[in-house]
Image: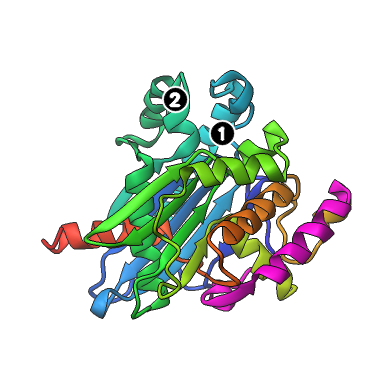
Amino acid sequence: MRQGTCNLCLNVYNPPVFYRLGGGLVRYAACDVGTNSCRLLVAEVGEEEKIRIVLKEVVTTRIGEGMHVSGWLQPGAINRTLNCLDSFIDIMRRCQVTERVFVATSAVRDAINRDDFIVLAEERIGMPIQVLDGKREGELSYQGAKAGLGLRANPLLADVGGGSTEIILQRRGIKSFSINVGAVRAWEADWNENEIKTRLAAGIPKGIKAKSNPLVLVGGTATSLVAMKKGMTEYDPEQVQGEILSLPEISSYYTRLDQLTLEERKVIPGLQPERADIIVKGTLIIKCLMELLERQEALVSDSDLLEGLILTLHNKRSGQG
């Protein structure tokens, strides 16, 4: 995996021709300021809303650092995130992006000083940042994952992030439920298995355990588990997309990761070193969630919120949104 200009910057997917704009296509960019990382997707949308990835970038800025204790975004975390947004703006210019959108999710929406961060961020990027509520975050993740996987049946989607977990299904419209249980939040609070399961159980709506809907997992923990399973030295979204993880596999990974030291986890092929501290709690959340939903396996999608945002931009531009 190639390191970018920032020492926390991981270039996830970067085809060598990303500067060249496809003939007649509009280039879109979506940025998500998440609890653990800032993510950028630059893409084009072709026929039948087929998304072609131009560039995908992840930077571990951890804006949610210390949120569990103080409720405030910390100055160091804010500065790291603002610097990352600067670099993303530069990438968008070089990629000849026409339409762009910036959103913030769990940590920012919960922070006492979120408005201060939003003002600073908007000064840096020169445009508004949308703070998504859990419902909208879930809807966009659902749209992105379903389109990316090409599923015929409507999935039951679980988006395990740094600050929250979204449960999303389509039943007379897309229904999204947000639970304040995420990998960073659980790690900072040091919740044990019983605490995590209790908090998840309280937020899972009744009547969603129907086995006819395939369970789909999105988020950095799920994709990291697939990358570790395949021993990836470079992250390849095509190998992650649609991969199946079983509950026994996830339980085994949790046991193994929990027994390793932080330094030992940092050198596991497929696992970002910056995620090595929170991966144990993230894996435990997925394990508890699948047990509560009575599922033995799940599909993993690399497509998620960012792809949903790209499709929204595309539909708006083409007059469908």
Magenta region includes residue 37: no
Place residue 1 in its image quadrant.
bottom right
Quadrant placement of the C terminus? bottom left
Q: Residue furthest left?
A: 319
Spatial CA span between label 2 and label 1: 10 Å
Asked whether residue 111 is in view, the answer is yes
In the image: residue 233, left or right of residue 76: right
Q: Residue at x 42, y 64 (%)?
A: 156
Tell me the number on the disc at residue 311.
Answer: none
Residue 267: image x %, image y %?
83, 59
**Percent x, y of residue 77:** 59, 29
Question: Which residue was labeled with disc 1?
Answer: 63
Observer-nearest of 28 and 104: 104
Is residue 28 visible from the viewing direction of this image?
Answer: no
Secondary structure of the residue carrying tag 1 is loop
Q: Position of residue 4 (x, y in %)?
A: 63, 53
Identify which residue is drawn at 68% across, 32% down. 189
Q: Amino acid at mark 2?
A: Phe
**Neighbours of disc 2 within 10 Å: few (<14), some (14-19), many (20+):** some
Dot 2 corresponds to which residue?
117
In this view, the residue in front, 216 or 72, is 216
Span highlighted in magenta in the image: 234-263
Q: Tell me the element at label 2.
A: helix
Q: Earlier in the sequence, mark 2 or mark 1?
A: 1
**Location of residue 110 with respect to 158 vertically, above or below:** above
Residue 213, by quadrant, is bottom left
**In the rendered image, the vertical position of residue 104 relative to residue 26, given as above or below:** above
Q: Contact, CB < 8 Å: mark 2 with mark 1?
A: yes
